[in-house]
Image: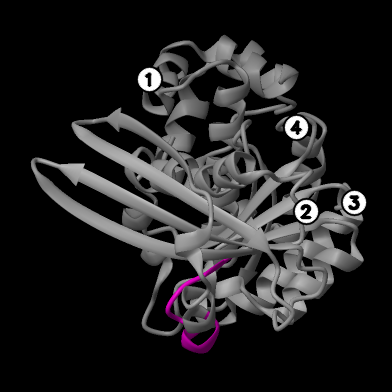
């Protein structure tokens, strides 16, 4: 259910035994849920659900790999306040959200991401994990924070840091062996090439062990586009040979494709007009939770999973109670 009216209608129509199984003694109406969601402790809710998710997230080739990225809940913008910006941590592979923090706007995402690292370290521990982050977070303080927690980082460097980008670009990449992989998906051909070298002495990121050049060529309908990015990672060549490093970077974007995109398109998050208190954040948290629950149950098409459970109340309740 996308909003409070729909939630209230579901509660009014569902079998009382299903409600009792969920711990509801009576039929709360739409306004009750609206007040409740607006007044919840959103930080506590995210921490508790993150601890639960950490017990089910699993590993990728023996390691926990976590993507961190932010998303603005645009529909929650009002004349009096900006739309909240939520920074989430997604487990590669399982697609479960391990934690989330809020910042008033996208400008605070860098600090919010470090706060999220602290939350993750306190709840499940970051020791031994790999954390992937986009170019916004290629920051010395972020790298130092991860190394201090016993984690490895994979940071992308793009044009937002022109000096570092330029120095990485000028490395003698033409002399470095390339690992290449191609695939055809949705009418396009994607070729990814990665070249990896030992970290130069002038790299100042704490614990840095390797730098890489990642080239992505997309061909669709005879038109070719080329994107080049650079990586800095604390994982050495034994822990992260070129193809493993490339796989970590590619799966980082699951947080966009398997979480943020699904919340926007399948749940209509950006069109939602839920705005009171922390309710926009709580609803975003619950959307992420439902996506994770459905993935644990084997659903690869989240829209299909939602349609199925909308028709079958008891299986929906069972999924919440037993996942």
Name the residue carrying label 2: 236
Q: Point out the tag, 1 or 4, that comes first from the N-terminus.
A: 4
Q: Point out the tag, 1 or 2, that comes first from the N-terminus.
A: 2
- Image depth: mark 3 or mark 2 in front: 2
Name the residue carrying label 3: 127
Query: Looking at the picture, how far across and down is residue 229, in whole percent?
Result: 45, 64
Q: Residue at x 45, y 72 (%)?
A: 83
Q: Residue at x 63, y 22 (%)?
A: 296
Q: Against 53, is 32 above or below?
A: below
Q: In what quadrant of the picture does the N terminus appear?
A: top left
Q: Which mark is residue 315?
A: none
Query: Looking at the picture, how far across and down is residue 178, in whole percent?
Result: 49, 48
Residue 190 shows up from this direction: yes
Label 4, secondary structure: give it: loop
Name the residue carrying label 1: 304
Q: Point out the tag, 3 or 2, that comes first from the N-terminus.
A: 3
| Magenta region | 156-164
Name the residue carrying label 4: 59
Q: Point out the tag, 4 or 3, that comes first from the N-terminus.
A: 4
Label 2, secondary structure: give it: loop
Q: Point out the tag, 3 or 1, that comes first from the N-terminus.
A: 3
Label 1, secondary structure: give it: helix
Left or right: residue 134 versus residue 210 is left
Q: Nearer the viewer, residue 293 or 191?
A: 191
Q: Residue at x 37, y 59 (%)?
A: 273
Query: Looking at the picture, how far across and down is residue 10, in whole percent?
Result: 46, 27
Q: Against 313, is 6 above or below?
A: below
Label 3, secondary structure: give it: loop
How far apart are labels 4 and 3 at the CA level?
13 Å
- Image depth: mark 1 or mark 4 in front: 4
Residue 71 shows up from this direction: no
């Amino acid at each position: 259910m996308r909003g409070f009216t729909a939630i209230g209608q579901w509660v009014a129509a569902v079998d009382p035994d299903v409600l009792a199984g969920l711990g509801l003694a009576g039929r709360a109406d739409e306004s009750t849920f609206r007040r409740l969601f607006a007044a919840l402790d959103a930080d506590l809710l995210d921490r508790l659900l993150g601890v639960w998710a950490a017990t089910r997230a699993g590993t990728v080739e023996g390691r926990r790999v976590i993507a961190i990225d932010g998303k603005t809940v645009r529909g929650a913008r009002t004349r009096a306040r900006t739309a909240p910006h939520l920074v989430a941590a997604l487990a590669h592979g399982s697609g479960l959200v391990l934690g989330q923090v809020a910042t008033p706007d996208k400008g605070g995402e860098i600090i919010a991401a470090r706060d999220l690292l602290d939350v993750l370290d306190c709840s499940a521990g970051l020791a031994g994990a790999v954390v992937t982050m986009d170019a916004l977070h290629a920051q010395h303080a972020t790298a130092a924070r991860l190394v201090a927690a016993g984690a490895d980082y994979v940071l992308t460097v793009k044009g937002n840091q022109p000096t570092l980008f330029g120095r990485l670009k000028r490395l003698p990449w033409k002399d470095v062996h390339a690992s290449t992989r191609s695939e055809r998906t949705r009418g396009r051909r994607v070729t990814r090439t990665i070249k990896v070298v030992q970290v130069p002495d002038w790299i100042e990121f704490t614990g840095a062990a390797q730098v890489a050049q990642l080239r992505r060529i997309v061909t669709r309908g005879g038109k070719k586009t080329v994107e080049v990015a650079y990586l800095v990672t604390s994982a050495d060549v034994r822990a992260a040979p070129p193809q493993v490093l490339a796989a970590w970077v590619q799966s980082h974007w699951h947080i966009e494709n398997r979480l943020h995109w699904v919340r926007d398109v399948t749940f209509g998050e950006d069109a939602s007009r839920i705005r009171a208190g922390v309710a926009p954040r709580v609803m975003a948290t619950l959307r992420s939770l439902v996506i994770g629950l459905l993935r644990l149950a084997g659903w690869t098409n989240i829209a299909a999973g939602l349609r199925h459970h909308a028709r079958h109340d008891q299986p929906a309740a069972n999924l919440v109670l037993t996942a």
